[in-house]
Image: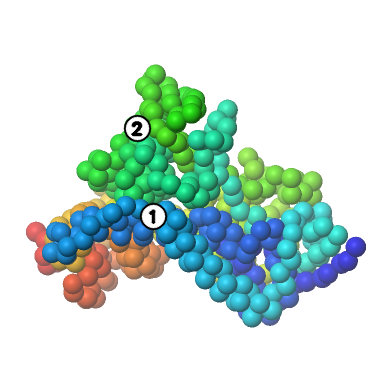
């Protein structure tokens, strides 16, 4: 058996893991990055990137179908799933090669194989013993199911849905969160009949209620069906499809059932508990600086309770590398990390919902304003409807920005800065937003809250 020693050993090469490795290398540490599959993890190979490629293909299908309204003669002859798959895989391949080159250029030692924590400072990979002064756990997540709901055949998770070689005639989707509504959006654009089943009262239930209702209206207009507030009971499969039964006895028939009920932490059978790491329902418990209960043992990404987002993983990976280096990085609370759902229309948000802001500051201390994209020139050109909702503390900072509409995910960068820098609408009002852009919608909302509206009453 061989033993290798490093300053930092990172177990898992997904978003959080490779970000920690890259930043640690920049800071002069020797780094080992252990990955059983491919560097890039779920996000690059089975999550963010491939699903967004599908969503762009879906947008092209919609634009082609609706080309006449722009004065363009075009006909949508169908969806070539082999072509869509080739397009998607080409994007992944390019990004993967780029990431491999970056890891190599930073002189990070990549170790292929399944790692197991055998001591607070040791990871075993086959017959290799990898020892670090610090170890970062970054083992990611897996697609969850529900108790008694077996995945197989026509019941599948997002991983199998990505690989479908055909466009299903009809789909039932269990779960109205980010994954569920994104796949619903893709399949509707490709021509499927879609029904979403969500046990909570709204789609994207973690968003501001006004935004959730806006998405429900938009989906209804698109012909996407949904059942809200009634939980799933069971599913049966037959030769041509599935029959889903809800707790109220209602049944939904479809060719396939996509199970999109969230992702669980991938921590089982990796030696964490045996070494003494505190685990709660599979998640690794850390302090606010991402250190576990064991000194010099850290955790980042989807295995840490909270938002399961690739960019949260990036942020936490960078944070841990800088914390180890003694740089005392700034903590960003989960609520102030931007969220984007890339459906049509898109949903984007950062900070407190209006309800949460009233809970925290008191209802009389909060003002919100909804700017309708109907007043925005670029949105009109794009043919999108939606809203930008800004929540502020009276005589205080903006604490939440919530948006729905085509491409609003591209506006979240400015919103993130405003919320995290605790800017007041009055601070932003003098700054001019380029015209015509959708970005002006943010500017108009801030102008209104600063008491000097321009294109609004």
The answer to whether residue 43 shows anywhere in this view is yes
Which residue occupies the extreme front position in the image? 77
**Residue labelled with disc 2:** 228
Cα distance between the residues tagged 2 and 1: 33 Å
Which residue occupies the extreme left position in the image? 457
**Residue labelled with disc 1:** 80
In what quadrant of the picture does the N terminus appear? bottom right
From this view, report whether residue 68 is shown above or below residue 231: below
Q: Nearer the viewer, residue 122 or 237?
A: 237
Mark linked to residue 347: none
- Per the image, label 2 sits on a secondary structure element best described as strand
Residue 176 is drawn in which quadrant? top left
Instruction: Kindly identify the residue that appears in the image at 55 percent across and 44 percent down.
Output: 143
Neighbour class for label 1 at 10 Å: few (<14), some, many (≥20)? few
Q: Are marks 2 and 1 in contact (CB under 8 Å)?
A: no
Instruction: Kindly identify the residue that appears in the image at 13 percent across and 64 percent down.
Output: 71
329 displayed left or right of 403: right
Instruction: Kindly identify the residue that appears in the image at 73 percent across and 63 percent down.
Output: 112
Q: Earlier in the sequence, mark 2 or mark 1?
A: 1
Percent from the top left, x then y, of residue 455?
11, 65
Percent from the top left, x then y, of residue 246?
41, 24
Q: Nearer the viewer, residue 30 or 101?
A: 101
In what quadrant of the picture does the C terminus appear? bottom left
Percent from the top left, x then y, of residue 44?
53, 61
Q: Nearer the viewer, residue 251 or 430?
A: 251
Instruction: Kindly identify the residue that appears in the image at 82 percent across and 70 percent down.
Output: 5
The image's colour scheme reads rainbow
């Amino acid at each position: 058996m061989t033993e290798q020693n490093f300053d930092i050993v990172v177990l898992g090469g997904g978003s959080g893991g490779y970000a920690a490795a890259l930043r640690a290398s920049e800071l002069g540490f020797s780094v080992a990055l252990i990955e059983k599959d491919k560097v890039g993890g779920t996000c690059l190979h089975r999550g963010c990137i491939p699903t967004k490629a599908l969503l762009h293909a879906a947008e092209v299908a919609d634009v082609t179908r609706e080309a006449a309204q722009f004065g363009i003669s075009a006909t949508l002859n169908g969806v070539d799933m082999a072509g869509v798959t080739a397009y998607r895989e080409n994007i992944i391949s390019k990004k993967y090669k780029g990431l491999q080159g970056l890891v190599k250029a930073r002189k990070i030692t990549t170790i292929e194989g399944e790692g197991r924590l055998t001591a607070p400072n040791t990871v075993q990979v086959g017959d290799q013993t990898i020892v670090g002064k610090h170890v970062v756990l970054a083992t990611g997540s897996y697609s969850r199911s529900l108790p008694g709901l077996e995945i197989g055949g026509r019941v599948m998770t997002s991983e199998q849905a990505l690989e479908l070689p055909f466009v299903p005639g009809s789909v039932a989707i269990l779960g109205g969160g980010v994954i569920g509504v994104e796949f619903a959006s893709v399949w509707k654009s490709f021509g499927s009949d879609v029904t979403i089943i969500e046990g909570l009262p709204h789609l994207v239930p973690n968003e501001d209620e006004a935004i959730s209702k806006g998405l429900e209206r938009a989906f209804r207009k698109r012909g996407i069906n949904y059942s809200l507030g009634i939980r799933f009971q069971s599913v049966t499969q037959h030769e041509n499809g599935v029959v889903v039964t809800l707790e109220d006895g209602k049944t939904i028939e479809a060719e396939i059932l996509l199970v999109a009920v969230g992702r669980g932490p991938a921590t089982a059978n990796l030696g964490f508990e045996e070494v003494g790491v505190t685990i709660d329902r599979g998640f690794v418990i850390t302090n606010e600086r991402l250190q576990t209960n064991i000194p010099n043992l850290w955790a980042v990404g989807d295995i840490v309770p909270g938002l399961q987002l690739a960019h949260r993983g990036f942020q936490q990976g960078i944070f841990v590398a800088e914390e180890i280096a003694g740089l005392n990085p700034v903590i960003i609370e989960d609520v102030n990390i931007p969220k984007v759902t890339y459906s049509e229309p898109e949903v984007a948000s950062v900070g407190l919902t209006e309800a949460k802001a009233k809970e925290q500051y008191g209802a009389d201390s909060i003002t919100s304003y909804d700017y309708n994209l109907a007043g925005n020139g670029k949105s009109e050109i794009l043919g999108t409807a939606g809203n930008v909702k800004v929540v502020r503390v009276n005589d205080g900072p903006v604490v939440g920005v919530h948006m729905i509409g085509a491409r609003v995910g591209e506006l979240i960068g400015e919103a993130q800065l405003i919320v995290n820098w605790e800017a007041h609408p009055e601070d932003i009002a003098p700054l001019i937003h380029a015209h015509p852009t959708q970005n002006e919608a943010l500017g108009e909302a801030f102008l209104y809250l600063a008491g000097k509206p321009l294109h609004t009453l």
